[in-house]
Amino acid sequence: MNDYMTGSVILIAAFIFDILLGEPRRYHPLVGFGNITKKLECLLNNKGNDKPWRTRLFGILGWSLLTLPLPLGYFWLHQDTLLFWCLDAVIVYSAIGYNSLVKHAKQIAAPLMNDDIQQARHFCSYIVSRDTSNLSEQEIARATTESVLENGHDAVIASLVWFAIGGAPLVILHRLVNTLDAMWGYKNPQFLYFGWCAARMDDLLGWPTAKVSSLLYASQALWCRHTSMFNALRNGLRQGRQYKSLNGGWAMATGATVLNVSLGGQGIYDGKVVESVTLGQGPQVTTADIVPSLNLVRNAAIIFIISCFLVSLIAAV
């Protein structure tokens, strides 16, 4: 079995593990990483009481201590043996989160369909950083769909792509960097300077994978009647670069175009009203669009894995 075929089998196994098992219920590695991150932040971050350059320097130090040792150590130890191939599959399985994405989205969609908006607001607060206490049904559907499309890149497609590029060490690096950005990448007094490195490195690692995600989303326009693959990618380029998150904007604009819905609008973050550009095209997103957005992410992952498998077959000839 060549290296390409081995990698494809690992991706297939990891995705199947995620579909069947979901996230580990106990001892999830990212939970432990989060606890360490909080302790290190308390130790290094003066929370705006120091000079900006010094706070940034401590942020870079914290980022380096948290994200580099584990992937570098695994790279150094890794061997082409059955044991490490199994470990690779477990690592990729731990990194991708499609099953979790489905559960979170459906526990919002279900109360919406039962007219229980308070319950939907409660569960929506689990997956978005905006204030959900006064969101309407349409706003909750929009927030959920945006989260599905963006996290479809962050938590699913990016891990698959980085494994195809550089194996499990890059998957570990990306997942740690992405998690650290979710904890430190805020533009508030506490993290404006300290979280600068975490935010920039997540942008850097997400740049190529966001483009691949957009391509995988757009490819599904081939069997849609309301748009074209070219139009979906064009919206990703034009609208995505106007969004507050360039990588997230690419994925959401392309995905929304394929779904034939419009995303964006007002949201309240840290007590401030933030106006987002329109992403996608068509009518405003509704509750009925949540499940199709999940299917879009699932299909994107399957298309990528099948493509890797076909490449491995060609390489074996």
Image (cartoon, rainbow, N blue to C red):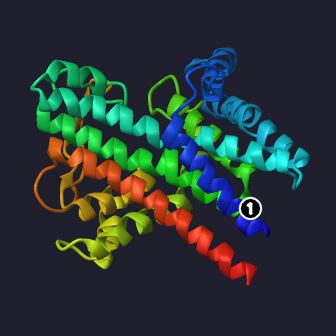
Residue 99: x percent and y percent?
Answer: 45, 39
Residue 29: x percent and y percent?
Answer: 66, 28
Q: Which residue is mark 1?
A: 6
Relative placement, left or right, of 204 versus 91 is left
Relative placement, left or right, of 35 versus 69 is left
Asked if residue 197 shows in the view, the reply is no
> In the image shown, does 35 or 308 lie closer to the viewer?
308
Residue 200: x percent and y percent?
Answer: 57, 46
The number of numbered discs placed on residues in the rendered structure image is: 1
> In the image shown, does 15 or 197 lie closer to the viewer?
15
Instruction: Kindly indicate the quadrant of the structure image that contains residue 61.
Output: top right
Rendered-image quadrant of the N terminus: bottom right
- Determine crowd level at label 1: few under 14, some 14-19, many 20+ residues with C-alpha closer than 10 A: some
Disc 1 secondary structure class: helix
Q: Amino acid at mark 1?
A: Thr
Relative placement, left or right, of 137 versus 65 is left
Instruction: Kindly indicate the quadrant of the structure image that contains residue 306.
Output: bottom right
Relative placement, left or right, of 18 versus 132 is right
Residue 37: x percent and y percent?
Answer: 65, 23
Rendered-image quadrant of the C terminus: bottom right
Instruction: Kindly indicate the quadrant of the structure image that contains residue 91.
Output: top right
Asked if residue 295 shows in the view, the reply is yes
Residue 293 in the image: above or below residue 102:
below
> In the image shown, does 150 or 224 lie closer to the viewer?
224
* Identity of the residue drawn at 83% across and 50% down: 82
> In the image shown, does 260 or 182 lie closer to the viewer?
260
